[in-house]
Image: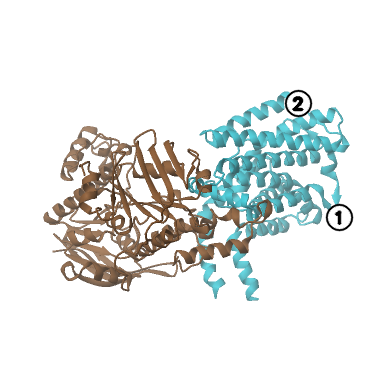
Chain colours: A cyan, B brown
Amino acid sequence: MRSASQWCARALRRQPLLPVWLVLVLALSGLYGEFGTVANFRNIAIQASPLIIAAVGATFVIMTAGIDLSVGSMLFLAAAIESSWALASAPAGVVFAAIAATGLLMGLVNGVAVALTRVPALIVTLASMQVFRGAGGHITGQQNIDLPAHLRGIGTSSLLGVPAPVLLAAATALGGVLVFGRTVFGRYLQAVGSNRAAALNAGLPVRAVTIGAYALAGVLAALASLTQTARLGAVQPSIGDGYELTVITAVVLGGTSLFGGRGSITGTVLGALVLTTAQTGLVFSGASPYVFDIVRGGILLVAVIAAGTRWRTLAQALRPAAVS
Amino acid sequence: MTAITVTGLSKSFGGVVAVDGVSFTVRGGEVVALAGENGAGKSTIKNIIGGILRPDSGHVDFGDAGNVATVHQETSLFPDLTVAENILIGHLRSSRVGTVRPAALRRTASVLLRRVGAGFGPDAVVRELSAGRRQLVEIAKALATEPRAIVFDEPTASLNLDEREMIMRIVEQLRDDGVAVLYITHYLEEIFRLSRRIVVMRDGRLVADRPAGELDRSTLEALMVGRELAQGYPETTKPRQEIALSVRDLGDGARVEGVSFDVAEGEIFGLAGLMGSGRTEVARAIFGLAGKIGRIEVAGQPLRRGDVRASIAAGIAFVTEDRRNEGLFLERPIRESLSIVGLGSVCRPLGWLDHAAESRLTKDLATAVALTARSGQEVDGGSLSGGNQQKVVLAKWLSGQPRLIILDEPTRGIDVGAKAEIYRLLADLARAGTAVLLISSEMEEVLGLAHRVGVMHDGRLAGILDRRRATQEAVIRLATGGIR
């Protein structure tokens, strides 16, 4: 019993978002009978999947004290290229590889520009955000393009009852946790974000690490794009529009510091789940879609203020109990 | 006439007692020194007196003085505002409608600047001032309220000898004007020169409150540390024949040029000179952090220019003078700061971490530098005392035996106990054959440790003195541009 409460205290200290999410789920389930069903939870998980994938990538970038505003545009450009391949009816494997390569390339453009120039990441990705979206619009001609069945497989298939998007998101999250906690690259990421000068002094490959973070974010944005378009069954001009706000909100909500050096993948996953759950709850309430923008902004503000005050004191209050 | 009366002050932070029942007084016209190691509770006392912290119990009374001004260690100035605006930042609304009147500001500021003997005007932008001049601005700012009681917190920590002398004269002048001064510093010579009484703190308690005349240096150190310190500096062995570092005509393209010297294996080579004489630039150029002109060889092999990774691969370690901003990962566990250099050599293939090997490494490193952080290796670097932070910054380089270790001000702002540990460590490294390049403003430690002392003046190496000839006078003569 004591170890269980210890575990709870530690989990709460490290992931204060977990109880918030659970309370949210319970409250919505109480309010709306249909909310607390397996089908709905399954739906939430599928909906959250692209967000989780993209936000894990953004966590790498933000950990280095960088920022990637271009994530939504990367999503769109990847989808646009997918749609052009779709017209050529190439095999799914080739299309997916091409999309991943597109993501890598976009990430490398961001990463190289950030690492090799003194231009702030905010400016670099503000520029690339517009370039990528413009390129995507040019390719699609701002049309809705339906995807052929073989490219929708990711959206519709499942393994042992678990939908493919959820599997992809889970694999991404697990991979992210491993990279963060178990690899030298992950450690270097956190070191660069925590103190760039100290990382340089210790002989760390600061530029390569920075480029790697943006490249990973690009690949994961492409993967998020594949997941998203497969679920929608079509490439729409609105894909990824304003997505960077949701992604960055999920990361910050998950406790990752915008100043770098502090954060976690599990926090990001929880952040994405909280946002998606809230969004689904709003759908149940019948509110207009614009209300989600208000709610998302509100959640972010409350979370950041609470992180600065409440949770820290709560964690301090719990610490002696955990020791005794 | 008592100006600062502190009665029974206690303060805890989350279960850790920082200050425990401390009482003392400072009278008008006297300087009382507050001495103690890092973490003894001096800063907490300062912050309670300054009104930044509220004590758990006890109280502070300013008697006739009414209030107190504080001169902070790390200056609290706005770098982009002028000197006048900084000095009078709390009194900007000079006219009735609430607008700022620049002429009046400058007049008032000029008067205050003259009082501190500043050789610069009120219109200078603070960013462009040297550390010493900023400290003068800081003092002028404190004087703006005409305080009858002032707390000085390490006012000379980043200053050169001339500037230190200037600050001490100001303190003496204030004392003669009847101001009560509480003076916090690590420099024992300043304590003995300035203060009438010395209040010593250790582990949050007051352990002594005595007239300065009753204490000598070693007694004071013993009171601060709580035990007798080994006297003097550790024994060093004779350097070997082989040359570890050879520097020829080194420059940084800006202020340093034509610097040439050799350091043998097992030799401690001190680099002395005034602040701004180019010592740090030499160190950074050797390590590859600054552009360099000239030729550097490590163990006979030429070193690639401007490439930190190549320097590290050649066996050079560099302990920066700015441990917080350039050495530590403040919000990460200290384990990660300790292992950052050696991490690549204790990981599994493909860059997978080996946590067990890492923690063995960091435990060994912590033992090697006698890290005394009680809280283990999972606390954040930022929560350590200055001495322990310095030990971590040094320890991270010890995972392999470095061929050359460069230390820039390794004992700045750390307590006497930690200093002694670092001296011992340097002597041990030299004995094992590492070449040590020691840069320090504390002449005593350079003279006490180094086999030879190079003295920088105005970007050039003014001379190299061997141990027999290296006296304070000889070093100062070279450092100030005098001839040998």
Cβ–Cβ under 8 Å for marks 1 and 2: no
Quadrant in the picture for the C terminus of chain B: top left
Give how far across and how far down residue B234 sits, in percent. 34, 65
Quadrant in the picture for the N terminus of chain B: bottom left
Is A62 situated above or below B238? above
Residue under label 1, please give it: A160
For image coordinates 21% across by 40% down, the residue present is B109
Tell me which numbered mark, 1 or 2, is placed earlier along the sequence.
2
Q: Residue A265: give its label.
A: none
Q: Residue furthest front?
A: B241
- Amino acid beneath label 1: Leu
Residue B288 visible in the current orientation? yes
- Amino acid beneath label 2: Thr
Viewed as shown, does residue B399 lie left or right of B219? right
What is the CA distance from the residue labelled 1 to the residue labelled 2? 36 Å
Q: Residue A140: give its label.
A: 2
Residue nearest the viewer, comparing B457 with B14: B457
Viewed as shown, does residue B217 lie left or right of A237? left
- Disc 2 secondary structure class: helix
Residue A260 visible in the current orientation? no
Residue nearest the viewer, comparing A47 with B254: B254
